[in-house]
Image: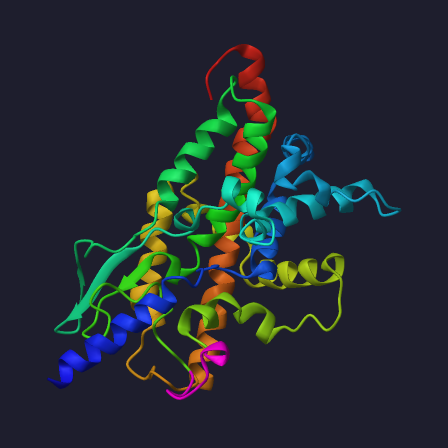
Amino acid sequence: MQKNVKILVLFFNLLFFASVPALAWDDAGHKTTAYIAWTMMSEQARARAFETLMNAPEDADLSVFYVQDSRSEAVKRRELFMLAAAWADIVRDKKFPQRAEKYHRSNWHYDDTFWTLENGRVKILPNPGQEGGVAIKQLTEFEKVLRSPSATGAEKAIALAWVLHIGGDIHQPLHTSARVTELEPKGDLGGNLFLLTPKDTPREQSENLHWFWDSILVRVIPRNDMSDDEYIPLLGDIIIRKYPAEEMQDRLKTGDFRAWQEESFAVATSEVFPSDLERFQTPSAKYRRHAFAVSEQQMALAGYRLGALLEQIFGGAAEKALNSGVDE
């Protein structure tokens, strides 16, 4: 009887949290990943990526992020590239219903593997009828668009923004994970159902595990009124120093999006749910430190992978292949 009551309570929680968007890395996290990718790209690749974004459809409100002011051209182009990585979250805004209807797609942001612990071991489960996300399918499709000689400039602009965003999303471990428990028989919605605040906390003040991982970067390194020009390079350079590109070259697996998802899922099952993590309680200082270190490494890996992919598509090798008529 008690078990049935618990499941009933979780059912109503599911009804509420199913409408809560899973944002993956927050605004700063996505821009930082894009900044790291930008550092990996040649000047030619950067120029072609910028030109691609400037071809975005007017109703997408994407190219408007290129601001004509007194800053250097290099800084303004980098800013547009970084903002493009957050565009897929910006178009969620229902205050602009036509834009949201045309461009927002909730299930493109994640690609969950359903799992549970059985005798202390991870057991992969079939999808229990819950939306599992199609991030990998969409990444694959958008890469094809970027490489296609027949795709329009507008199509390539939207594809690039989505590649930057989804490529970051799937490195947030909880965007690849749906943990099934007695309380969450259809999965935990990427940690959205794992509450970290007391049971009686008002709904609008509740915090959950997904939010904890999404926002960890800005909570550990506060913005303190810095502009993006100051703050994002600060974050990116800290991560690059800790996890240099040359130390991750053998992990890039450029374009192998399923391998990226599987690695992120392995992080979710091994690092996100230690035995001392309790529902309705703030994670320990030890957990917070570890989560931050894991998140930094995941952002570095996402940035390097995206940078390598876009260098392939937009860089010198791509131009040489195009001019010679050889497929990339």
Q: Residue at x 35, y 70 (%)?
A: 271
Q: Nearer the viewer, residue 98 or 289?
A: 98
Q: Is residue 42 visible?
A: no
Residue at the image position 58 percent from the left and 18 percent from the top:
320
From this view, report whether residue 97 is shown above or below residue 148.
Answer: below
- Residue 262 visible to an observer of this rendering: yes
Is 123 displayed left or right of 58 in the figure? left
Q: Could you tell me residue 205's position as x and y percent?
A: 50, 80
Q: Is residue 208 above or below residue 114?
A: below
x and y, in percent, of residue 262 in the image: 31, 52
Query: The N terminus lies in which quarter of the figure?
Result: bottom left
Residue for point 51% across, 57% down: 299
Task: From the top left corner, tell me how far across and down residue 133 is, in percent.
Answer: 34, 49
Q: Is residue 46 shown in magenta? A: no
Taking the image as shown, residue 131 lies to the left or right of residue 243, namely left
Tell me the colour scheme of the image: rainbow
Residue 58: percent from the left, percent from the top? 66, 34
User: How many labels were placed on the picture?
Assistant: 0
Residue range highlighted in magenta: 197-206
Furthest residue in direction right, as rendered: 70
Q: For this rendering, which residue is in front, 315 or 92?
A: 92
> For the stretch drawn in magenta, what is the main secondary structure?
loop
Residue 83 lies, with reference to residue 309, above or below; the image says: below
Report which quarter residue 279 is drawn in: bottom left
Residue 211 position (above or below residue 44) = below
The image quarter containing residue 3 is: bottom left
Q: Is residue 268 left or right of residue 206?
A: left
